[in-house]
Image (cartoon, rainbow, N blue to C red):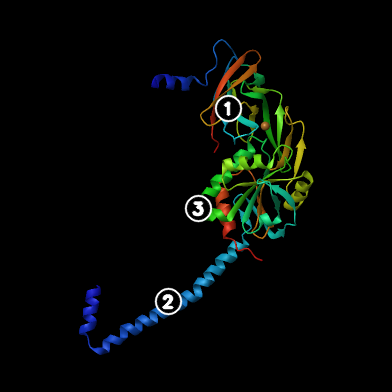
Amino acid sequence: MEETGREAGRSRPTRSKGIPIRNGVIRIAAIAMIAAVALPLGILAWREQAERSRTLVSGTLLPQPRPVAEFALTGDDGKPFTRAGLLGRWTVVFVGYTHCPDVCPTTLSQLKAAKAGLGPDAARLAVLFMSVDPERDAPDHLGRYVRYFDKDFRAVTGPADALTALGRQLGFVFVKNPAAEGEGYGIDHSAELILVDPKARLAGYLTPPFRAEALAADFETILRKQVAP
Amino acid sequence: MKCIRILGGALALASMPGHACEGLEVSDARVMESPPGASVLAGFATLHNSGNVPLIIRRADSPDFSAVEFHSLVRRDGLIRMTVDSSLTVPPHGTLAIKSGERHLMLFKPAKDFREGDRVRIRLFCSPGTLELTMPVEKSG
Ligand SMILES: [Cu+2]
């Protein structure tokens, strides 16, 4: 085809030479114009739609994200964990304790599977296990516990009153239940996953029962979201 | 060698001879592998009663754990709670599923960090008789 075209161009008189070129320029200009207008419009429309959608497969997003005030807890590295620890990435907070042999490991396994499905985007999502059992869950124990599931998972705990106060902000509760275990106590706790946006604002909740595929889809949705200042 | 190993695997879940929990059949018995240092593990199984009367399991114990309890999970007002059941009842010609999200055998203070492929021994006390189970440890998910 190329050979023929070049051949034809060379053999033809000047009259026909200019026309295909001008046609081509017009066509390119037209495509460029359409692209210049339509592409950003399309992106805007798509973005707007993504912004508007409050419904996730396994939960909901708040109409307006709620800023989280300063708090003081301890990370699994033994260092202070404050509001700054929530900045810069989406954070999925899971409230539990390590003396919970079914729900907590199951949820952490599902979170691991969901996060693995995100590919490189997984780096933009933090998973934070919040132990509401500071009596038994020392920071180093928590670190070993969560990293058994995923090396990037982090854990945090702190004094019961600090946890209670943060619970009021993030919408989780926990109640010590002495009768639950013959050999100790249980802790009744919220089972929702709490979504915190990269500006450290409460953004929404995911509610059980969880499925790894649904969680992965929801994580993709929130990572696509434009986070307004 | 190969035959013996296969036979060993197949027999692992069978009851010990000479003991009786008349009519009780156990399948899908397994213990979830847990992070190193975990102080409690969860055991799951499906219990079937082939008899004509309800089968009651009064308690359980294990040489591999300090204690074994029957736990249920209750969800109420957005909270999840573990509660202790004093006994398990398998209905006549029926099944009781001890399954994740609903019930578990709460296994306290493991004698060591059990890993996938290990086996733990659990003894169920029926009325009358006992049933000894060997439950494989499996990774969750
Ligand atoms: Cu339990």
In what quadrant does ligand 1 lie? top right
> Which chain does the numbered disc 3 sit on?
A
3 and 1 marks on the same chain: no
Residue drawn at x 31%, y 82% as measured from the top left: A20
User: Which quarter of the figure is the N terminus of chain A placed in?
Assistant: bottom left
Q: Residues within 10 Å of mark 3 (few under 14, many from 20)?
A: few
> Which chain does the numbered disc 2 sit on?
A
- Residue under circle 3? A119
Q: Residues within 10 Å of mark 2 (few under 14, many from 20)?
A: few
Name of the residue lying farthest toward the bottom: A15
CA gap between label 2 and label 1 equals: 65 Å
- Tag 3 secondary structure: helix
In-front residue for pair B61/B25: B61
From this view, report whether residue A97 is shown above or below residue A45: above
- Cβ of mark 2 under 8 Å from ligand 1: the answer is no
Residue drawn at x 59%, y 54% as measured from the top left: A125
Q: Is residue A163 visible?
A: yes
From this view, report whether residue A135 is shown above or below residue B133: below
- Is there CB contact under 8 Å for labels 2 and 3? no
- Residue under circle 1? B45
For residue A31, the mark is: 2
In-front residue for pair B139/B130: B139
- Tag 1 secondary structure: strand
**Marks 2 and 3: which is nearer the front?**
3
Residue drawn at x 59%, y 30% as measured from the top left: B113
Q: Is residue A211 visible?
A: no
Residue drawn at x 47%, y 74% as measured from the top left: A35
CA gap between label 2 and label 3 equals: 34 Å
> Which chain does the numbered disc 1 sit on?
B
On the image, the x and y values in percent for residue B112 come to 60, 28
CA gap between label 3 and label 1 equals: 35 Å
